[in-house]
Image (cartoon, rainbow, N blue to C red):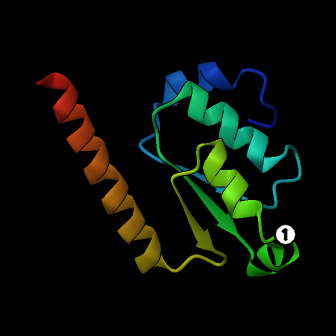
């Protein structure tokens, strides 16, 4: 998607297990995207950010978590870090789903 318009239909069609967002998106504000995605989907959202961006804006991650972010990784993300986050998020999602079914 290159705009927030039509995002709901694409999310329903794809039904992602996890959403990775780059903090340096050029086509939209990442915080607006996080807010929109968290309202439209239960998929966990992970922000990938360049450490220099956090040095310039130390409150960015705080605002992102308030917008609905689940986790964050410095760029470039290490494979082991990505896999660990995915495992934790999917496990917590399965536990939440099982609790709703009880």
Q: In this view, does 55 lie above or below 33?
A: below
The part of the image, by quadrant, that contains residue 84 is bottom left
Q: Position of residue 99 (x, y in %)?
A: 18, 32
Q: Is residue 7 above or below residue 61?
A: above
Could you tell me which secondary element the residue under label 1 belongs to? loop
User: Looking at the figure, which quarter contains the C terminus?
Assistant: top left
| Residue at point 68%, 59% (across, down) | 62
| Residue at point 45%, 76% (across, down) | 81
Numbered disc total: 1
Q: Callout 1: 10 Å neighbours few (<14), some, many (20+)?
A: few
Question: Is 28 on the left-hand or right-hand side of 86?
Answer: right
Q: Is residue 11 above or below residue 73?
A: above
Question: Is 43 on the left-hand or right-hand side of 40?
Answer: left
Q: Nearer the viewer, residue 50 or 26?
A: 50
The part of the image, by quadrant, that contains residue 68 is top right
Residue at the left extreme, as displayed: 102
Q: Position of residue 16 (x, y in %)?
A: 47, 38
User: Looking at the figure, which quarter contains the N terminus?
Assistant: top right
Question: Is 4 on the left-hand or right-hand side of 80?
Answer: right
| Residue at point 62%, 34% (across, down) | 37
| Residue at point 24%, 42% (across, down) | 94
The part of the image, by quadrant, that contains residue 22 is bottom right
Which residue is disc 1 drawn over? Answer: 57
Q: Where is residue 77 in the image (x, y as percent from the top left)?
A: 58, 76
Q: Position of residue 53 (x, y in %)?
A: 82, 73
């Amino acid at each position: 998607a290159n705009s927030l318009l039509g995002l709901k239909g694409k999310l329903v069609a794809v039904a992602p297990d996890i959403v990775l967002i780059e903090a340096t998106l050029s086509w939209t504000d990442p915080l607006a995207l996080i807010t929109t995605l968290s309202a439209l989907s239960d998929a966990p959202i992970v922000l990938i950010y360049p450490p220099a961006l956090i040095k310039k804006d130390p409150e960015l991650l705080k605002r992102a978590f308030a917008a609905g972010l689940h986790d964050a990784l410095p760029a470039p993300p290490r494979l082991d870090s990505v896999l660990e986050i995915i495992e934790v998020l999917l496990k917590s999602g399965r536990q939440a789903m099982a609790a709703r079914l009880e």
